[in-house]
């Protein structure tokens, strides 16, 4: 049963602490201050409502089973720690980004009870705060990260399996934006990157020359490179597939300064690594990229746009959509059709042979 205890505060106002004890769950309590409500009765009413709702949830879970004893007292911070430490989470190709997204939720709501986190009011408030910082697509990714954390809690018994994630939270995203580099911009970007550091120059060259995703690039190892064939194995991908992509000789050359002295890094070592030999964090790369693009005079070019630039340069050089799809790791050619407009009316491979056959009929 729940107990409501009234306290006199130093300012003369009252607060009400609601405590719920339902075996076999650990006791849970929450305090409601009069100053946070319109009146003292309203504060007490909120304490009673909270206790009744929690009692109902715990009694239901007692019958169903499958949740931990500390489900009522578990904080969002504790849920986040377990979620980020889970092997399946750590195996995500986008783990660094996910970790950064979850950190935002923890910094803002870490002390909140995990049971109370999936509240429409709380999550809509958070969405508005995120919108002040990011575009709709990025806000949706933060919301998706929070939902994945809650789903993890439901699947592992940290949260009740019937806990509902509020509907209609996701924002409508504008049509995908695509920004390409022209030859002059490419030159300025590479000059600015080279002026900043060998690592940023090599990273920019790799991104444009190989066209892989940022998460794929940061997990690439020296042993993935085959200089004889001029290729690099892309083993960790968004689509859970592996491929071997072409790597231009200029990119191989740009990577050489990353090898310390005369000692070749171990094959298993990461190419783009920090001082501890671990892959550099996504936010570190982006922070450095912000400076590069400012110096290069292309403030609207995101790191992901280097991937678009790779595709556009390949197509302008005569690559087919199928070849671009393979190089960039698209599951099908249809995804690469977004680049077809770059060379409208371009002569397809085999056009000359077809012309020869047709010309033979007119002779």
Image (spheres, grey):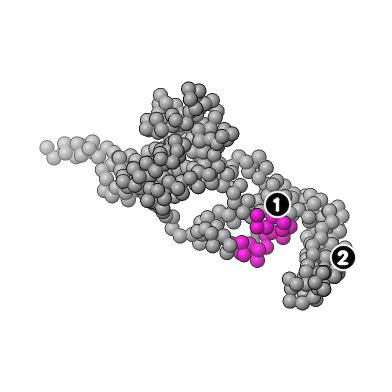
Number of numbered discs on residues: 2
Position above or below: 347 against 223:
below
Q: Which mark is residue 3?
A: 2
Residue 207, percent from left and from top: 43, 40
Relative horizontal placement of residue 319, taking residue 101 as reference (left or right): left
Relative horizontal placement of residue 144, taking residue 188 as reference (left or right): right
Disc 1 designates what residue? Answer: 77
Q: Does the magenta stretch include residue 125?
A: yes
Kind of element beneath mark 2:
strand
Residue 153, percent from left and from top: 70, 50
Task: Say which quadrant the N terminus sits in.
Answer: bottom right
Tell me the crowding category of disc 2: few under 14, some 14 to 19, or many 20 or more residues within 10 angstroms, Cα based.
Answer: some
Residue 77 vs residue 342, the one in the foreground: 77
Which of the 4 image quadrants contains residue 92? top right
Which residues, given as a range, are shown in magenta?
107-127
Q: Residue furthest left?
A: 363
Kind of element beneath mark 1:
helix
Task: Say which quadrant the C terminus sits in.
Answer: top left
Q: Is residue 249 magenta?
A: no
CA gap, disc 1 and disc 2: 26 Å
Mark earlier in primary sequence (1, 2): 2
Residue 277 vs residue 43, the one in the foreground: 277
Which of the 4 image quadrants contains residue 60? bottom right
Task: Identify the residue at horizontal 60%, vertical 40% (top origin).
Answer: 91
Residue 242 vs residue 177, the one in the foreground: 177
């Amino acid at each position: 049963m729940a107990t409501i205890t009234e306290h006199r505060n130093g300012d003369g106002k009252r607060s009400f602490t609601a405590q719920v004890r339902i075996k076999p769950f650990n006791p849970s309590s929450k305090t409601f201050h009069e100053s946070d409500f319109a009146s003292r009765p309203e504060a007490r009413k909120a304490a009673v409502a909270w206790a009744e709702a929690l009692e109902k949830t715990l009694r239901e879970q007692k019958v169903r089973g499958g949740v931990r004893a500390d489900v009522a007292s578990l904080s969002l911070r504790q849920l986040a720690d377990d979620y980020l430490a889970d092997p399946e989470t750590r195996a995500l190709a986008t783990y660094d980004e996910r970790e950064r997204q979850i950190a935002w939720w923890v910094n803002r709501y870490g002390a909140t009870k995990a049971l109370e986190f999936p509240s429409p009011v709380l999550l809509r408030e958070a969405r508005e705060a995120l919108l002040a910082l990011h575009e709709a697509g990025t806000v949706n990714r933060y919301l998706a990260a929070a939902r994945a954390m809650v789903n993890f809690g439901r699947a592992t018994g940290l949260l009740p399996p019937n806990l509902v994630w509020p509907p209609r939270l996701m924002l409508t995203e504008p049509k995908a934006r695509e920004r390409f580099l022209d030859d002059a911009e490419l030159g300025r970007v590479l000059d600015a990157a080279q002026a900043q550091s060998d690592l940023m120059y090599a990273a920019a060259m790799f991104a444009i020359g190989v066209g892989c995703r940022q998460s794929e690039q940061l997990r690439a190892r020296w042993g993935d490179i085959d200089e004889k064939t001029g290729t690099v194995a892309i083993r960790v991908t968004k689509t859970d597939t592996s491929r071997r992509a072409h790597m231009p000789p200029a990119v191989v050359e740009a990577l050489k300064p990353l090898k310390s002295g005369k000692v070749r890094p171990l094959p298993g070592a990461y190419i783009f690594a920090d001082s501890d030999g671990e892959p550099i964090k996504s936010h570190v790369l982006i922070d450095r990229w912000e400076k590069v693009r400012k110096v290069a005079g292309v403030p609207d070019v995101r790191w992901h746009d280097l991937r678009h630039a790779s595709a556009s340069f390949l197509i302008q050089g005569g690559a087919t959509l199928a070849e671009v799809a393979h190089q960039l790791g698209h599951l099908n050619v249809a995804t690469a059709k977004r680049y077809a407009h770059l060379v409208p009316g371009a002569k397809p491979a085999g056009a000359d042979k077809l012309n020869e056959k047709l010309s033979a009929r007119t002779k």
